[in-house]
Image (cartoon, rainbow, N blue to C red):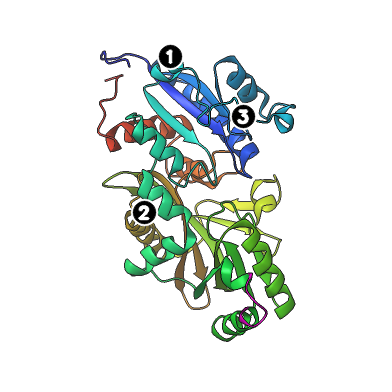
Amino acid sequence: MATAMGATVTVGLVFGGCSGEHEVSIRSAQAIARALASGTNMAKYRVLPVYIGKDGVWQAGPEAAAVLAAGVPPQNAASTTSSTATPRLRLPQFEQVDAIDIWFPVLHGPNGEDGTVQGLFTLMQQPFVGSGVLGSAVGMDKIAMKMAFAQAGLPQVKYLAVSRDEVWSNPCIFPKLCDRIEAELGYPCFVKPANLGSSVGIAKATTRKELEAALDSAASYDRRIIVETGVTAREVECAILGNGSPRASVPGEITFQSDFYDYDTKYTSGQSQHTIPAQVPEEVAQRIQTMAVTAFQAVDAAGIARVDFFYVEATGEVLINEINTLPGFTATSMYPMMWEASGVSFAELVDRLIELGFEHTGTVDPKG
């Protein structure tokens, strides 16, 4: 590892991964790679792309660089399978890993922002950008997250935690579960797998039949499920940057025509509109910023996060929805846009995130 003052920092940019957000991860990594190769960052950083295929194989060097340049998975990705002779832990060559000064995971969803890869970097005793194992895991599991928010006194929509066993139970238990959801939450309600990111597997239920189908679908994704009451509100987000003394960006608002902010709406250009700063009263904006910092600290996040809220304009209520500890960096991603509107350019943002990664892990930045 380089240690000289002013030395170039080698950033292991990890992208792809074994989740449904594989393609989005590649697009986020492209944007970060461009930022690290622009302006003053060009002299500070050297990017080593590390691509994790859908089959879990890690690749560094020319293979990973080719995927990053193309912006899409290799055409033969679906046909690659692991043989019995392949080691269970399939990392790049050790000499390539040893050259990395800090890891920048751009892995959305399971096996990327849930603490698993963060645990690997921790075991390797290498610094990385973003939250550690605890912050990532709590931020990923919607049930644990909401329990942490409740403990911190943050107002939320009503919700119920449900297990797969309750859904896929005998015919006597499942109807009682639906009865309880109808009595406590009513319609409309939203059914979500607890551990999938970017609105994957989420369904809106307005009838008993839709509720039963939504629960069955969510149970196919995760053994932990959360059901939330629907609320008529504006969706406002806030970006966080920092470690022990985190900063909040100006809030931004998302509007869309679909029933809710689902995966396709989030990542398809033209399907949603962003207003930054959000057109809300100054007192509401300040409340959102304060609550975002509280949420960040409640889950023990670090470096980076986007916090999502419901603003009930009719009553003036602000309800926290969720925190995302590894938000997207694509052209339609709110996190970098909110910081741009707050006076922090994309290139400055990734530079600061790397500095925060060294700081959070107690490692000296080799560039000095």
Per the model, the C-alpha gap separating discs 1 and 2 is: 36 Å
Give the SS element for disc 3: loop
Local crowd at mark 3 within 10 Å, few (<14), some, or many (≥20)? few
Q: Which residue is drawn at 70% across and 80% down?
A: 208
Does residue 233 show up?
no
Identify the residue under disc 3.
84
Identify the image quadrant of residue 139: bottom left
Label 1 sits on residue: 95
Q: In which quarter of the image is residue 199?
A: bottom right
Q: Identify the residue shown where x is 41% and y is 35%.
A: 120
Q: In which quarter of the image is the N terminus?
A: top left
Residue 78 lies, with reference to residue 302, above or below; the image says above
Q: Residues within 10 Å of mark 2 (few under 14, many from 20)?
A: many
* Residue type highlighted by circle 3: Thr
Say which quarter of the image contains residue 144.
bottom left
Q: Gap in Å between the C-alphas at discs 3 and 1?
A: 25 Å
Q: With 262 as the anchor, is 90 left or right in this view?
A: left
User: Mark 2 against mark 3, which lies toward the viewer?
Assistant: 3
Q: In the structure shown, which secondary structural element does the residue marked by tag 1 occupy? A: helix
Q: Is residue 355 left or right of residue 71?
A: left
**Considering only vertical position in the picture, is 148 above or below 344?**
below
